[in-house]
Amino acid sequence: MSQNPYADDRGNKDASITKPGPGPTLHRGAIPAERPETQSAFLIGDQMTGGYGGGADILHDCTIAVDAGEIAVIVGPNGAGKSTAMKAVFGMLDLRKGSVRLDGQDITALSPQDRVKAGMGFVPQNNNIFTSMTVEENLEMGAFIRRDDIRSTMEQVYDLFPILRDKRRQPAGELSGGQRQQVAVGRALMTKPKVLMLDEPTAGVSPIVMDELFDRIIEVSRTGIPILMVEQNARQALNIADKGYVLVQGRNAYTGTGKALMEDDEVRRSFLGG
Ligand SMILES: Nc1ncnc2c1ncn2[C@@H]1O[C@H](COP(=O)(O)OP(=O)(O)O)[C@@H](O)[C@H]1O
Ligand SMILES: [Mg+2]
């Protein structure tokens, strides 16, 4: 049995022992530009404004960020711009205003491929695997930027998601929804990212499979990879989140610790089903 690097104890803390830190734990409306805890984040899309092509702006001064060792979760209604904000951070959108920084470097001008080289792993909401290729070919494709030996990383992915080892010769399109999401996350891990961005990793799976995926995501974060994640299962996601963002119509509506958001009456009523 090879050692599983995703199973050690470093990195992210359990959300139940998250420190509230100084100052308010919940912030309403736009994010003040000077907020130091956001400014020093490991990955930040900072006050992003922009839309698709020449179309109207979808994002308005929108800020999303994740700190080292943390899980940050973005929630909000359908069409709020959650995926658009993730695409903007990944460089798939031309921003009219704002910037993206990774580990202290301004990467606003980098292409998505160069952002991968700089350490970003991104699992988009749709079309995140090659269905006609085998599981193993998907993982190999994920490592496209690497020139070194990828086998130990592949073993780490198989240790994290053992079912993928069993199914490595099967076309990914034949797998269940939850298994496909494992392929997608595994593919992103093949570049050995410094930060992982996931857009609705539990879309369309049963509650049991969702819990299982969340456990694996926590495991990844404990290896020291910060996670910036969009989730429709808002309550469950905020439960494992160090930081949460509620987006509404392309704007920051509420920001706080996962705990503060879950305890806020207005957030509960409007976004968590009471
Ligand atoms: N490729 C695209 N081209 C033009 N508009 C888009 C595109 N993708 C999304 N939009 C629009 O951007 C807005 C936000 O969508 P999206 O970011 O997908 O929301 P969410 O992920 O929060 O459900 C919606 O009004 C949607 O119609
Ligand atoms: Mg979306």
Image (spheres, rainbow, N blue to C red):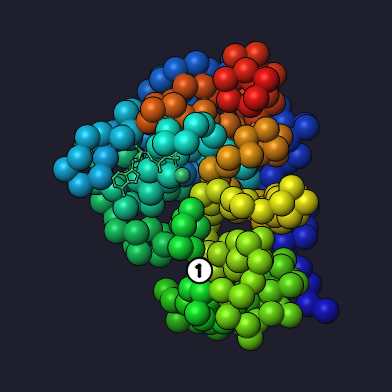
30 versus 194 height, above or below: above
The answer to whether residue 100 of the structure is visible from this angle is yes
Would the CB of label 1 be found within 8 Å of ligand 2?
no
Classify residue 7 by image quadrant: bottom right
| The C terminus - image quarter | top right
132 versus 108 height, above or below: below
Q: What residue is shown at x 69% (from left), y 44% (from top)?
A: 12
| The N terminus - image quarter | bottom right
| x, y percent for residue 81 | 40, 37
6 versus 250 height, above or below: below
The residue that mark 1 highlights is: 129
Residue occupying the far left of the picture? 54
Q: What residue is shown at x 66% (from left), y 66% (from top)?
A: 176
| x, y percent for residue 256 | 58, 24
Which residue is at the front of the view, 84 or 116? Answer: 84
Q: What residue is shown at x 72% (from left), y 66% (from top)?
A: 160
Tell whether 45 sits left or right of 189: left
Q: Amino acid at mark 1?
A: Ile
| x, y percent for residue 179 | 66, 66
